[in-house]
Amino acid sequence: MAAPTDKPDTDQPDLDKKGAGPATTAAERANPASTRSADFGIDTTAKSTSEAIRGYLTGLRNGDLGSLPALLGLAALFILFTALDSGGTFPSLLNLANLLQQGAGRTIIAMGLVFVLLTGEIDLAAGTASGLTASVMALHLVRDGNLLGAMGTTVFVLFAAVIVVGIVLAVLLRIWAAAAFAGLALLLLVVGFPPNPWLEMLLAVCVGIVIGCITGFLVARVGMPSFVVTLALFIAWQGIILQLIGDGGTLGLRDPVINAVANGNLSTLGSWLLFVVAAGGYAAVLLNRQVSRRKLGLVAQPTGLVLLKIGAVVLLAAVATFLLTLDRSPGALPIAGVPYVVPVVLVLLVLGTYTLDRTRFGRHIYAVGGNREAARRAGIDVARIRASVFVIASAFAAIGAIVYSSKVGSVSPSAGGGNTLLFAVGAAVIGGTSLFGGRGRVSNAVIGGAVLATVENGLGLLGQPAAVVFVVTGLVLLLAAGVDVLSRRRSAVAGR
C-alpha cells in the first residue's frame, strides 16, 4: 500500500467525512445560497438567446404549443377574409372596432370558464346563468326598481330564498368574498333602490355569484358530476328567465350608461392614456420579473429577448390605438376612440392572470387540475378550490351578460341560450386551454374569442348563411380539441 501524502488528489473531489459527496468548497462556503439552490435542483444559470430559442423550439416539439396555433389561425383568417372581401369592408376600421365589441361578451364568459376548465370540470350552465343575471338587471330597470311588483310575491320570495341559500352555502364552503357579495344581493333585493345603472349591474354580478355558490356546492361538496349539475341548472335557469320575462317578451335597455358599455368609446385623450397605462404596466411587470429572477439567481430569459417582446407589444398597441382614434364613421357623425369594452376586458385579463400566476390560490387551481388526489395529500382544500372556480365563472358570466345585453340593447327569453355557451367554451379551448385540466391561461380565452368573432364576422360579410358559420365554427373547435389531445400525448412521451 502506498504511503499517504499531504497533497490531496486534484483529479477527484474531496469527500465529506461520511463519504456521501463532495466536501464544501471555498466558493460554496463564500456563497451558501448557491449551495442551497443546487441542493434543491433550482436552475440558477442564465439563458443565452440561442439557448432560449432552442428551449422554446424544444417545448413546441414536446407538445407545449400554448396559444401558438390559435394565433397562427387568427393571422391566417385575417389574411383570408381580407383577400376574399372584395368590398374592403372586413379590414376597415369600423368593422375591426365592431369585432371587438361583438365578441367581448362571449369572450368574458370564456375567461371565467378557463378557471373551471383548469380544474378538469365543465360549466354548461354559464350561458343561461348569464341570461338570468341580465334578466334581473333589465327587469329592475324596466319596472322602475319595483322587482316585487315585476316578479310577483311568490316568485320574489322564492328568489330571495335562493339568495339566502347561496349565502349559507358560501359560508359552508368558506368562500367569504362570495358570502359578502351574496349578502349584498339580498340587501339590494329586499331594501330596493330606484333605477340606477351602476347598482343594477352590481346586482347582476351579485346574482351571478349566488349562482356560482349553488353550482360549486353541488359539485364540490355533494360530489355530483359537474356535467350533470350544470346541464340541469342550464335548463332550470332557462325556465326562470322565461318566468321573469315571459315567453316571447323582450326587455329593452334604454339607459345610456348600460348602452354605452358595449357601444361607447373612449375619447382620444382617454384612448392614449389607456395605452400609456396598459403598455407601461406590461413593460414594468416583465422588467420587474426579469430583475427579480436575476437577483435571486434563478433562470431568466435573455434581457434582449425580454426587451424585444416589450417593444413588439408596445408597438402593436400604439398602432392599434392610433387607428382606433381615427374617425371610422361612414356618415357625418364622427366615431372615434377605443371602445369601452377594451379596458373592461383588459382589467379582467390582468386580474385573472395575476390570480393564476402570482397567488397561492392560482397555484392551487393548477394543482387540483393536474392531480386532484396529489393536491389533497399536499394539504390543499380541494373542495373549496373546486367550488371557487364556479363562483368565478358565474361572476364573469354576469359581466359578459352586461356587455352582450348592452350590445343588442335588450334582453329576451333566449338570452344566454343557444350558441352563447358553446361559443364561450369554444373560445377557451381554441385559445389553448385544455379540456383535461391543469393547462391554460385567461389570455387563451381572449385569443380564442378573437378567432371565433373573426370567423363569424368574416363569413357574414361574405354573405354565407348561418349553416356555413356553424359548420366552420364546429370544425375549428374540433381542430383545436385535436391539437390539445395530440399535444398532451407529445408531452406525455417527452415526460413533461
Image (cartoon, helix red, strand yellow):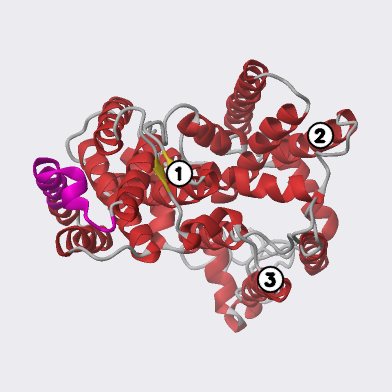
Majority SS type along the magenta span:
helix
> In the picture shown, does residue 132 fall above or below 309?
above
Q: Position of residue 291 (x, y in %)?
A: 67, 76
Judged from the image, the secondary structure of the residue bearing numbered disc 2 is helix
Residue at 55% in and 38% down:
428
Q: Which three-letter amino acid code belongs to the residue tagged 1? A: Ser
Q: Give the amino acid type for the residue marked by disc 3 in the picture.
A: Ser
Residue 397: image x %, image y %? Answer: 41, 46
Determine the CA span between mark 1 and mark 2: 34 Å
Query: Image quarter for residue 426?
Result: top right
Q: Nearer the viewer, residue 469 or 138?
A: 138
Q: Quadrant of the N terminus?
A: bottom right
Front of the two marks 1 and 3 = 1
N-terminal of the pair, mark 1 or mark 2, is: 2
Measure how far apart labels 1 and 3 are at the Cα level.
26 Å
Q: Which mark is residue 138?
A: none
Is-magenta flag for residue 163? Answer: yes
Q: CA distance from mark 2 to mark 3?
A: 32 Å
Q: Quadrant of the C terminus?
A: top right
Asked whether the residues under the numbered discs 2 and 3 touch, taking CB atoms below 8 Å apart as contact, a structural biologist would say no
